[in-house]
Amino acid sequence: MRWISASTGFMTALPKLHQQALAALAALLLLAAFLPSSDDAISSTPLSLDHLIDTDAPLFETPTFSIRQLKAPWTFDQVPVNETLLVPALGQGNGYQYIVRKGDTLSKIFERLQLPQKTMYQLLEADLNVLALDNLKPGHTLVFDKQDQKLQRLELQFSLAHKVVYQRKEGDGFEFNEVQLEGEWKQKLISGEILYSFTGSGKQAGLSQWEAQTITELLKKRVDFRRDIQRGDKFEVLLSRQYVDNEATGNNKIEAIRIKNRRHNINAFLFEDNYYDEKGRNLEKAFQRYPFNGKYRLSSNFNPRRRHPVTGLIRPHNGTDFAMRKGSPVVTTGDGIVSRVVRHKYAGLYIEIKHGQSYKTRYLHLNKSYVVKGQRVKRGQKIAQSGNTGRSTGAHLHFELHVNGRPVNAMTAKIPIAVSLTGKKKAAFQRQLKDYLARIETPKAKQQLALSAEKPDTKTKETTL
């Protein structure tokens, strides 16, 4: 009673405005005490994985990892850096998925998930001829399936349409299978008018950053985009984008390009993985067949079904080996941009170069590199010294050629070595050209372009490479 009396005295001593404010606050506190808690509220307390997995049969030795309870749909950046994102993989049986984060490496992920280093090295050995596990990027998904205290299966998901599956086989090793779904390719015509720059105007019209940059890189030898392209010039781009289950995968192909400049038209058409103008002239620099000058003995052929002589496990040889002494010069087989310079436990020091939209080359077991990631290189340029690094029985060069993401035999593959199409190839190109024109042009413009294609090269206004 004394407390109530003192409180009443204190209240009456306050100004009237303060009395009203305190009364309102007391009313709100009283109301909150009787209200039910909201099911939609986001808890600041981490949610243990005990709520997500059966702790009687844990995936790892001790299920100590947790994720924060987030209100769906949540974003990747909402997960705190010091927490592991490990959740059940839908549709993957007993699998649990880990989403790769910035700063992650395979060794860090295995250590965090309490998987033995020996298992990681077994996977890297199987990965030698696909080199996917050392190319992890934020957003990639790893799906682990562990049974009988051993990792039985690992699935690396690059996208909806591309994944690599590593499966434990009898004995103590893994085999891999690279899966690339064809999906559904949907054509789309994007057209617009140049306002300030082609890249900016293309993005405004619906091109992605990659698509706009690919076009400028392809046509830079035919047109100066800073000097020749002017405000008011028109463009049309016919492209195909890949979908799996009606969801875009991020893969796309640029099939036809037309820039209508005041002075002349610039055209590019995709045919058999290469781009040509309307006359069938190659717009991309030709490749050379061998990654060196001179002659070296071919010591091991391309063989995607090769088996290990001791373990019997499938160990694809997705390249061609040449017996070269340590320190021999290695050259790039085509113009491109260096995409990777990596030291690998089994592949040794290796270089990867992207050549436009369709081609990629790799050079393994090198002794020394003369290039860095992001550097532009020219066909025939010296990029490295051959060596004996990684798992190698002797000094040699392992050379790979990939076309549209798939390894092919570099010694027999059809690579762009001719300047112009002739004979049956040109006839096939002209048939495909008509199909492209039916999608991007008016009847009058199609007739004009057809006439231009029939004229001799000496009379055309097009730039000759």
Image (cartoon, grey):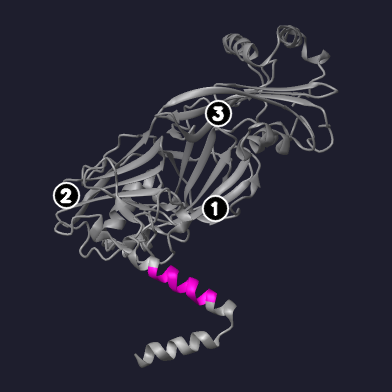
Q: Amino acid at mark 2?
A: Gly
Give, as a three-letter code, the residue at label 3: Lys
Disc number for residue 64: none
Rendered image quadrant of residue 436? top right
Give whichever of 42, 429 is nearer the camera. Answer: 42
Quadrant in which the N terminus appears: bottom left
Q: Which mark is residue 171?
A: 2
- The mark closer to the camera, 2 or 3, is 3
Tell which circle, 3 or 1, labels the residue nearer the N-terminal end: 3
Q: Position of residue 313 (x, y in %)?
A: 23, 42
Pick out the residue farthest to the bottom. 2
Q: CA distance from mark 3 to mark 1?
A: 34 Å
- Badge 2 local density, few (<14 within 10 Å), some, or many (20+)? few
How many C-alpha atoms fall within 10 Å of the one at disc 1: few (<14), some, or many (≥20)?
many
- Image position, residue 91 (x, y; %): 27, 40
Q: Which residue is mark 3?
A: 253
In the image shown, does 47 or 437 lie closer to the viewer? 47
> Does the magenta-highlighted stretch encompass residue 22?
yes
**Picture quadrant of residue 317:** top left
Q: Which residues are magenta?
A: 20-30
The kind of residue on which mark 1 rests is Gln
